[in-house]
Image: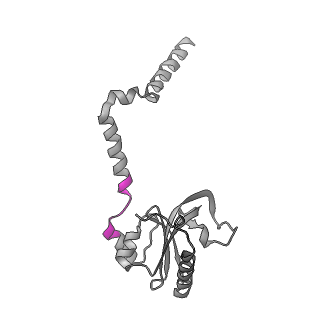
Amino acid sequence: MSKFVGMLRSTWCGAERFCGLEFLRRSGWAGVFIVIAIGSALSCSGMPSLEEQERHVRENELVLHQLTPRAFVGAWGAPTYQHAEFMQFFGMNDDSLIPRSRLASGEPPRGWEVRIEAGDALFLAYPDHGWLVVCFEERLVYREALTAAQLHALGRSWQHEDKFRSRFEVPATQ
Protein backbone atom coordinates (compact mmCIF):
# COMPACT_ATOMS: atom_id res chain seq x y z
CA MET A 1 0.00 0.00 0.00
CA SER A 2 2.79 2.42 0.84
CA LYS A 3 4.36 1.74 -2.55
CA PHE A 4 1.06 2.70 -4.24
CA VAL A 5 0.82 5.92 -2.20
CA GLY A 6 4.41 6.74 -3.17
CA MET A 7 3.55 6.36 -6.85
CA LEU A 8 0.58 8.70 -6.47
CA ARG A 9 2.70 11.25 -4.65
CA SER A 10 5.34 11.31 -7.41
CA THR A 11 2.63 11.67 -10.07
CA TRP A 12 1.00 14.47 -8.14
CA CYS A 13 4.31 16.29 -7.73
CA GLY A 14 4.98 15.96 -11.46
CA ALA A 15 1.57 17.40 -12.29
CA GLU A 16 2.12 20.18 -9.78
CA ARG A 17 5.30 21.16 -11.60
CA PHE A 18 3.40 21.61 -14.87
CA CYS A 19 0.50 23.44 -13.24
CA GLY A 20 2.87 26.00 -11.79
CA LEU A 21 4.90 28.39 -13.88
CA GLU A 22 8.14 26.59 -13.07
CA PHE A 23 7.97 24.71 -16.38
CA LEU A 24 7.72 27.96 -18.35
CA ARG A 25 10.51 29.56 -16.36
CA ARG A 26 12.83 26.64 -17.10
CA SER A 27 11.99 26.50 -20.80
CA GLY A 28 12.41 30.24 -21.16
CA TRP A 29 11.26 32.29 -24.09
CA ALA A 30 12.03 29.51 -26.56
CA GLY A 31 9.07 27.49 -25.29
CA VAL A 32 6.77 30.47 -25.50
CA PHE A 33 7.80 31.19 -29.10
CA ILE A 34 7.32 27.55 -30.08
CA VAL A 35 3.78 27.56 -28.69
CA ILE A 36 2.99 30.84 -30.50
CA ALA A 37 4.41 29.52 -33.79
CA ILE A 38 2.42 26.29 -33.61
CA GLY A 39 -0.77 28.18 -32.74
CA SER A 40 -0.27 30.63 -35.61
CA ALA A 41 0.39 27.85 -38.10
CA LEU A 42 -2.70 25.92 -37.03
CA SER A 43 -4.99 28.94 -37.11
CA CYS A 44 -3.89 30.01 -40.60
CA SER A 45 -3.85 26.56 -42.16
CA GLY A 46 -7.64 26.22 -42.47
CA MET A 47 -8.30 29.23 -44.69
CA PRO A 48 -7.75 28.98 -48.46
CA SER A 49 -5.95 31.71 -50.36
CA LEU A 50 -7.96 34.71 -51.57
CA GLU A 51 -7.67 33.57 -55.21
CA GLU A 52 -9.07 30.15 -54.31
CA GLN A 53 -11.88 31.76 -52.31
CA GLU A 54 -12.81 33.97 -55.27
CA ARG A 55 -12.85 30.90 -57.54
CA HIS A 56 -15.30 29.19 -55.15
CA VAL A 57 -17.54 32.27 -55.19
CA ARG A 58 -17.49 32.54 -59.01
CA GLU A 59 -18.46 28.84 -59.24
CA ASN A 60 -21.29 29.34 -56.67
CA GLU A 61 -19.58 26.99 -54.19
CA LEU A 62 -20.33 29.00 -51.06
CA VAL A 63 -18.42 26.94 -48.50
CA LEU A 64 -19.14 27.87 -44.88
CA HIS A 65 -16.23 29.12 -42.76
CA GLN A 66 -13.93 29.11 -45.82
CA LEU A 67 -14.89 32.39 -47.51
CA THR A 68 -14.34 36.00 -46.48
CA PRO A 69 -16.25 39.16 -47.47
CA ARG A 70 -13.22 40.19 -49.51
CA ALA A 71 -13.65 37.08 -51.70
CA PHE A 72 -17.25 38.04 -52.54
CA VAL A 73 -16.25 41.59 -53.43
CA GLY A 74 -13.33 40.30 -55.51
CA ALA A 75 -15.47 37.79 -57.42
CA TRP A 76 -18.85 39.54 -57.73
CA GLY A 77 -17.97 43.17 -57.10
CA ALA A 78 -19.44 45.44 -54.47
CA PRO A 79 -22.78 44.17 -53.14
CA THR A 80 -25.96 45.93 -54.17
CA TYR A 81 -26.92 46.12 -50.50
CA GLN A 82 -24.74 45.85 -47.44
CA HIS A 83 -25.77 45.95 -43.80
CA ALA A 84 -23.84 45.61 -40.55
CA GLU A 85 -25.30 45.17 -37.10
CA PHE A 86 -24.79 43.36 -33.83
CA MET A 87 -26.57 40.03 -34.23
CA GLN A 88 -27.33 36.84 -32.33
CA PHE A 89 -26.78 33.59 -34.23
CA PHE A 90 -28.24 30.13 -33.68
CA GLY A 91 -25.64 27.35 -34.05
CA MET A 92 -26.83 24.52 -36.31
CA ASN A 93 -25.82 20.87 -36.72
CA ASP A 94 -24.12 21.58 -40.08
CA ASP A 95 -21.91 24.19 -38.37
CA SER A 96 -23.77 27.10 -39.96
CA LEU A 97 -24.98 30.03 -37.90
CA ILE A 98 -28.47 31.35 -38.60
CA PRO A 99 -28.93 35.06 -37.86
CA ARG A 100 -31.84 35.86 -35.55
CA SER A 101 -33.15 38.38 -38.08
CA ARG A 102 -33.78 35.62 -40.66
CA LEU A 103 -36.27 33.83 -38.39
CA ALA A 104 -39.82 34.56 -37.35
CA SER A 105 -39.96 36.30 -34.00
CA GLY A 106 -39.69 33.80 -31.15
CA GLU A 107 -39.14 30.81 -33.45
CA PRO A 108 -36.02 28.66 -33.05
CA PRO A 109 -34.75 27.11 -36.30
CA ARG A 110 -35.13 23.39 -37.01
CA GLY A 111 -32.00 21.45 -36.10
CA TRP A 112 -30.84 24.07 -33.64
CA GLU A 113 -28.25 22.94 -31.13
CA VAL A 114 -28.02 24.62 -27.77
CA ARG A 115 -25.45 27.09 -29.07
CA ILE A 116 -25.79 30.81 -29.53
CA GLU A 117 -23.12 33.22 -30.69
CA ALA A 118 -23.32 36.98 -30.90
CA GLY A 119 -21.29 39.74 -32.49
CA ASP A 120 -21.04 42.14 -35.41
CA ALA A 121 -22.48 40.58 -38.55
CA LEU A 122 -21.99 41.73 -42.12
CA PHE A 123 -24.90 41.06 -44.49
CA LEU A 124 -24.18 41.23 -48.24
CA ALA A 125 -27.09 41.04 -50.69
CA TYR A 126 -26.38 40.24 -54.35
CA PRO A 127 -29.71 40.33 -56.25
CA ASP A 128 -27.97 39.72 -59.59
CA HIS A 129 -26.54 36.44 -58.24
CA GLY A 130 -29.53 35.55 -56.04
CA TRP A 131 -27.63 35.25 -52.76
CA LEU A 132 -27.79 36.72 -49.29
CA VAL A 133 -24.53 35.97 -47.49
CA VAL A 134 -23.77 36.72 -43.87
CA CYS A 135 -20.26 36.93 -42.46
CA PHE A 136 -19.39 36.77 -38.77
CA GLU A 137 -15.81 37.30 -37.60
CA GLU A 138 -14.70 37.72 -41.24
CA ARG A 139 -16.01 34.29 -42.31
CA LEU A 140 -19.09 33.15 -44.20
CA VAL A 141 -21.47 31.57 -41.68
CA TYR A 142 -24.84 31.75 -43.49
CA ARG A 143 -26.04 31.79 -47.08
CA GLU A 144 -29.55 31.89 -48.46
CA ALA A 145 -30.70 31.77 -52.06
CA LEU A 146 -33.41 34.40 -52.59
CA THR A 147 -35.08 35.96 -55.59
CA ALA A 148 -33.94 39.36 -56.80
CA ALA A 149 -37.24 40.87 -55.62
CA GLN A 150 -36.77 39.44 -52.11
CA LEU A 151 -33.20 40.74 -51.94
CA HIS A 152 -34.24 44.21 -53.13
CA ALA A 153 -37.01 44.31 -50.51
CA LEU A 154 -34.52 43.28 -47.82
CA GLY A 155 -32.03 45.91 -48.98
CA ARG A 156 -34.68 48.63 -48.96
CA SER A 157 -35.67 47.66 -45.41
CA TRP A 158 -32.01 47.97 -44.34
CA GLN A 159 -31.80 51.42 -45.94
CA HIS A 160 -34.98 52.47 -44.13
CA GLU A 161 -33.64 51.16 -40.78
CA ASP A 162 -30.33 52.96 -41.29
CA LYS A 163 -32.14 56.30 -41.44
CA PHE A 164 -33.16 55.90 -37.81
CA ARG A 165 -29.97 54.41 -36.35
CA SER A 166 -27.98 56.51 -33.93
CA ARG A 167 -24.23 56.75 -34.25
CA PHE A 168 -23.93 54.44 -31.23
CA GLU A 169 -25.74 51.65 -33.07
CA VAL A 170 -23.52 51.74 -36.14
CA PRO A 171 -20.73 49.11 -35.89
CA ALA A 172 -17.18 50.40 -35.96
CA THR A 173 -15.56 50.35 -39.39
CA GLN A 174 -12.33 48.48 -39.81
Above or below 32: residue 97:
below
Name the residue furthest right: 106
41 relative position to 147: left or right: left
Main secondary-structure element of the magenta-colored stretch: helix
Instruction: Residue 5 in the image: state x and y as whole percent.
Output: 55, 16
Say whether residue 51 is magenta: yes
Q: How many marks?
A: 0
**Quadrant of the rendered structure where residue 30 is?**
top left
> x%, y% of residue 48?
35, 63
Determine the image quadrant of residue 94: bottom right
Residue 16 % position (x, y): 47, 25
- Residue 15 rendering spot, x and y as whole percentages: 47, 26
Quadrant of the image containing the C terminus? bottom left
**Residue 40 vs residue 62, the one in the foreground:** 40
Residue beneath the point at 55% across and 77% down: 163
Give the side of residue 129 with respect to residue 89, left or right.
left
Q: Nearer the viewer, residue 54 or 93?
A: 54
The residue under the point 30% across, 34% down is 29
Tell which residue pokes out farthest to the bottom in this image.
Answer: 149
Give the left or right position of residue 168, taking residue 24 as reference: right
What segment carries the magenta color? 43-52
Pick the quarter of the image with the N terminus.
top right
Q: Is residue 11 above or below residue 154?
A: above
Return the residue nearer the eye: 99 or 158.
Answer: 158
Question: How is the rendered protein coloured?
Answer: one colour
Point 57% across, 67% down: residue: 98
Please check the rendered image and state whether residue 48 is part of the magenta-colored stretch, yes or no: yes
Considering every residue shown, the one lying at the far top of the view is 2
| Residue in view at x 38 percent, y 79 percent | 76
Residue ranking furthest to the front: 167
